[in-house]
Every structure is written in structure tokens, then in C-alpha cells.
Amino acid sequence: MPATRVRLLVMNAALGPLDYRVPEGMAVEHGSVVVAPLGPRQVTGIVWEDERLPTNPVPEEKLRPLLGVLDVPPILAPLRRLIEWTADYYVAPLAAVARMVIASGGALRGPATMTEYRLTGGTPERMTPQRAAAIEALDGEQATIRELAGIAGVSEGVLRGLVNQGVLEPVEVDVDRPYPRAAADHHLPGLSDDQREVADRLVELVEAREFAPVLLDGVTGSGKTETYFEAIGAAIAQDRQVLVMLPEIALTEAFLSRFEERFGAAPVVWHSSLKSAERRRAWRAIASGEAQVVVGARSALFLPYANLGLIVVDEAHEISFKQDDGVRYNARDVAVMRARFEKFPVILASATPALESLHMADTGIYEKLVLPSRFGGAQLPEIHLVDLTEEKPGSGQWIAPPLRRALFDRLEKGEQSLLFLNRRGYAPLTLCRHCGFRFQCPNCSAWLVEHRLSKRLACHHCGHETAPPEKCPECGEPDCLVACGPGVERIADEVAEMLPEARVAVVTSDTLNSPEKAAEFVAMAEARAIDVIVGTQLVTKGFHFPELTLVGVIDADLGLEGGDLRAAERTYQQVAQVAGRAGRGAKPGEVLIQTRHPEAAVIAALEAGDRDAFYEAETEARRYAQAPPFGRWAAIIISSEDEKEAREAAQRLGDTRPILDDVQVLGPAPAPMALLRGRYRYRLLLNARRSAELQQVIRVWLAGIDHPPGIRIGVDIDPYSFV
Ligand code: ADP
Ligand code: ZN
């Protein structure tokens, strides 16, 4: 008998589960996405198992009827379980997680068409040079007016004129028209023996259709991508979907062309800046099973794939897989859970795996597959330290003599160099020479960073920007502002001064802010139109430039100063990854690491190329500190626009802290970023034994206290950022 009443998980975190009546003739099942009345408004909800969403049932006579079932496939049971697991584990509202599944409002509206235009073959009554150029450029094209204007390089007005003249005609097209099909065997690579062995194992796992977490541990340039492509091919051959998660959109372009070469068609792309039509098209293709391979940022993880058979998390150690607002989840870890619920393999690929992942492999929970050497006989680069306490850069400079000599040498030989400094902009701090005034963000506990390219002082936390003033706002002295410390723009200036003929490119999220810009940069670097790349962490991974033979790390100590739990690990990963950009082609690479602490364990391990020594030392340090993977951390951030209100709320929480043997509560204390985006922040840290029911402890604790409406409480389980 069909259900006559249903319980909904509604897409509104402020509401609990709601019960409705199913009107006669309406067919719903668990997972159906429906529209229901809520007071005078409507809400979207997912039909859920009653027993999994306990609430006080509404009496039969008070039930209101559902308004309709949306024309999308039901959310399948394993994904419903993943939503529950994520909400439970990360102490987040179910609705907030479910919203990441229903990530396209447009897609819910059902099939749709849009109008595109194409040439009819006719000619306008009056030909102008612009019209002639447009007609020539648009031969064989069909797209929206806006897209055609882009292609032809004319205004939309010119094209509208051509529509009125009958030169362009409208065509109704399906918004969700199908994507080109990828073929598993479009272009098969010749794999090395090592690669073949790993690829065969991955294929075997895909074909087995069982949960199988794999750590693909291969040095930079070993062909991890090439190898997991074989596993993707196996899933395509089985007609199952694949998700590849990349840490940065900037890496997508290079990935797309490689993918297309191997499989004959581009994958479906998913990231937060898709236009809404692209978004709904991708969402519907994912939900129907038509999208074969999806490449995306972490937000692609929660989409309602019809038939997923493999997830690859590339550069799985990257911290960008951790979301730090809203639902604070780690996509790498949730990917493993998704694979478990849906029974397929998940591949975590990295040259510098997270300690947690290595630990899982060493304890036999993950299978470890290793690619020990670079492809095609390329050697790993030579690594040397530059001790900045002995080899001092000139005054106002940051590049020490040995690195200067190496840069000269590469330019002379026509080879490329890469300088790495993880600081955007020109200088991290600006102050007044006269009175010492420092430019600080009005909304955040942070200095304003000078950006000379865009002539701005900017906050990297909230986006606040201002033009650099002519005189000091404190003492009124003109022309007294000095830049302190280097950012990449300043290093680029130093290079330009030292090597006036060198072509220098600054690569940061400011300059590579779209897939097109990223593609342009890659093309220029490959064509050897760039001699020196100066970049942030954005250039540390993924890129493959065969002529790049020198990597200089401007300040290896920078990452160690933050004092957060993973500082050493992150420094190791960043430097090892950026070092991995050198010598990927036939010519050997060299890496110079500038440091003031050559004796630090992480720096010494980098120099010796001794990864195991680093991980062993780091493992012991973590064991001692009861840090992950041996113990667990959680952070609770209390914030308000009102300092006193935030402080008092934090105090109330502190006063009611749970007293337990296996959970220790530290704080409350002002967070390191005590002011962020206009909100004052206090923090409590929890350190728990693995056996503790950490989430349950937090839920019970937080539920016991009421706060004024201006207070926000954020829970961060397994935090990465300690600010
Ligand atoms: P990783 O992902 O481990 O850093 P890649 O898969 O990017 O390594 O491979 C490094 C370079 O070597 C790429 O340019 C890739 O095209 C090339 N390469 C790797 N394996 C092969 C292969 N079997 N045949 C041809 N080229 C390969
Ligand atoms: Zn700010």
C-alpha cells in the first residue's frame, strides 16, 4: 500500500523534520525530492525514513498535503546514509549537508530549453565591416547571443541587428543536452612496469565493486595520474560514474586536456563558479547517470551520482579539501565514507600523503600502492640548503647569493626557474616610517597586505580593500609609508632588477583567477615564454614544465611560524611538492631552500630527501601530543559582532565544560584571529582520546545552554586551521 503520510528532511536548517500527507494519485518514495507548504510559503524537502528522523508526529487531521514531486531522481539510500553520517560526525545540521546534495536550484525545475542562434546563410540589407566580421567568425557556431558576441568579438547589439535581418535564426535547444561520450580505450598509454602493476591492481579493485580505500603513494612525476586513468577507464567500461577531486580549479585546465587526450572527450566540470545553466546541466547529468566522469572541487563530492564506481582524490594531502565554514568537513575523509556506503574503491593520490593517511596504510586499513621513481628515467632533483644566517641577501633583498647565481646560470642556459613564497601581494605589512603606524584591517585581526599590481591595501581574510593613502592616517606625514617583508610581487621586482632581460611571471590566486588565465599561463610556460615564475602554493603542485630546472624556496621557515599542529607537516609537503616541479624532463633539477633554521628536523629531512625520517619523527611528536591520528582535536568557535557578548557566551560554555577522563577542554581564550570579518571570536579546544565519544559530548554540552541571537557557535571536528 502506498504511503499516505511521509516525513521530510526540509532544506532549512532552522526547522526539524516535518510530516505531510501524500495526496491521492501522487507517487513518492524514500529519497523523493518534493515541495511542501510551510505557512504561506513553500519548502523543498527530501522524503526520509520516519524512524531515522525522530520527531513528535503530527496528528493525522492536522497534516497538510504535499504540493508536488520534483522531476529529479530520488536521493538514493546510501547517499541518505552519507548525509546522516556527515551531519553526525561534523556536528552539523542535516539540512546544511542535504543542501550540498541539492546544489542546483535550477536543476529541480525539470527539463528546460534555451534559445541559441546560428547563421541562416542570408545576408543583411546593409553590410558593415562589423557585420561582415561577425558573419565570418560565426560560421558553424551555435550559441547564445552573449556567447556568440564573445566568439565574434562584437557587441550583442550588432548580433541582435543580424537577428532582426534574418541573418541569425533562433534555435530552441535542451538546456541539459548530453555531454560528449568518453571512451575507455580512446588512446591507451604504454605504461612502465611499475605503473602497469599499480594500474592492474586498481582496475581489479574497480571491477570487484567493493569498498577499497587505496593510498597511491608515488613521487612527483611518477605518473600517478597516468596510472589512475586506467582505473577510470575500467569504470567507464563498466558504465559506472567516476569523480576526480582536484584541490584547485587552477589545475583543472591541464587535467582536462590530458583527460581528453586519453579518453577522447572532456569530463564534466563542477565547481562553485559555474554559471547556473552549466550547473543545472551538470547536476542533472550526474543525477541521471549520464555524466561519466566528473572533475571538481570538494563540493562535487555530495552530488547525487546515480551510479558511482570510483572516486579519486588527487593531491589528497591538500588542505583545500577541508572546508572551513558552513559544514566544516574534510572531503578526503568523507570521500572514503562515500566509497564505503556505496561500495567502490577510493584512491587517495599524493607524493606527500597526510600523516593520517599514511598511518591508515601502515596499519593495513588502506591498501598502499607505490610508484617509487619518476617516469622515463627523470631523476628527483638535488636539494641544497642556503643558510640565511651565513649567506645574507643584500639589504632590502630576499634572494641570497647562491640562489642569485643559480638564477643567472639558468637564464644563461635558457632554462626555467621557479621561486616559491607563500605570500600574495607585495608586502605583508605596511607601516609609517615617521610614527610607526601599522595598517590593520578594520574587520579582522590582520595586517593589510600591499598589492602593487592592483594598487591596493587588502585584507586576505575579509576582502576589505583601500587605496594606499598619500600620507599617514595617524600622523599626517606625507610619503612615509614603508613596505615590510616580501610578497611574491616584491620578489618578482627583485628578479627584474637583477635579471632585467628575464621574462618574469607572478602566479597567485590574484593573477590566475580563472580557468582561462590558468590555461594561458600553462601555454606560455610550455612555450618557454617565461624564464622565472614567482608563485605561491598555487604553483607547488600539478604543473609539469620539462624545461624547469631550478626551484628556489625563498623562506622555508615561514610555515613553521604559525605554530599550528600541522605546521611541520605542511612545510614538508609544500617544499617537497614545489621541489617536485624541478627536473621533470630530460635535464636534472636543482632545489635551493633558503632557511634560518637548517638544523630543524623538517628542514634537515628535506635536504636529505629522507621522507621516512621526517614522517617517523612527526609521528612520534603526534603520539606524544595525543594529536591525530593518535588522539583527536575539535575546536569550538564562539563569535559575535559584540565583543562582550562573545566573551560572556564563551565564559558560559567554559563554566559548563564536561569533566571527563578522555576529553580535555582548553580555553576559552580569544582565538588567534580574535576579530574576523567584523566578528569577535573566542575559542575552546578539545583534545580527546580516540575512544571518546567526542561528537556526543559536544552535542550534549552545546544543547544545554541558550545564547543571545547574535551569538554564532561553530564546531570544527578534526580542525586544520587553528586560527
Ligand atoms: P604525477 O601525477 O605522479 O606527478 P604525472 O602522471 O603527471 O605524474 O606524470 C608526469 C609526466 O610523465 C607527465 O607529463 C606524464 O604525461 C608523463 N608520463 C607518465 N607516465 C607516462 C607514460 N606511461 N607514458 C607517457 N608519459 C607518461
Ligand atoms: Zn579583514
Image (cartoon, rainbow, N blue to C red):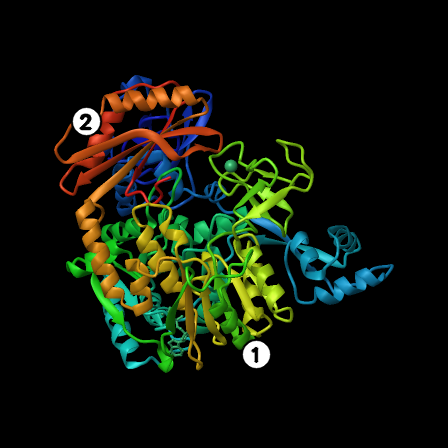
Image: 125 above or below 92: below
* Residue that mark 2 sits on: 658
How packed mark 2 is, by other alpha carbons closer than 10 Å (few <14, some 14-19, many 20 or more), is some
Image: 327 above or below 513: above
User: Which of the two residues, 448 or 536, is positioned nearer the viewer here?
Assistant: 448
Cα distance between the residues tagged 1 and 2: 65 Å
Tell me the element at label 2. loop
User: Which of the two residues, 601 or 11, is positioned nearer the viewer here?
Assistant: 601
* Residue that mark 1 sits on: 412
**Image position, residue 252 (x, y; %):** 47, 60
User: Which of the two residues, 586 or 703, is positioned nearer the viewer here?
Assistant: 586
The residue positioned 39% from the left and 52% from the top of the image is 559
Tell me the element at label 1. helix
The amino acid at mark 1 is Glu
Q: Quadrant of residue 196?
A: bottom left
The residue positioned 20% from the left and 31% from the top of the image is 697
Sequence-wise, the earlier of marks 1 and 2 is 1
Placement of the C terminus among the 4 image quadrants: top left
Labelled disc at residue 543: none
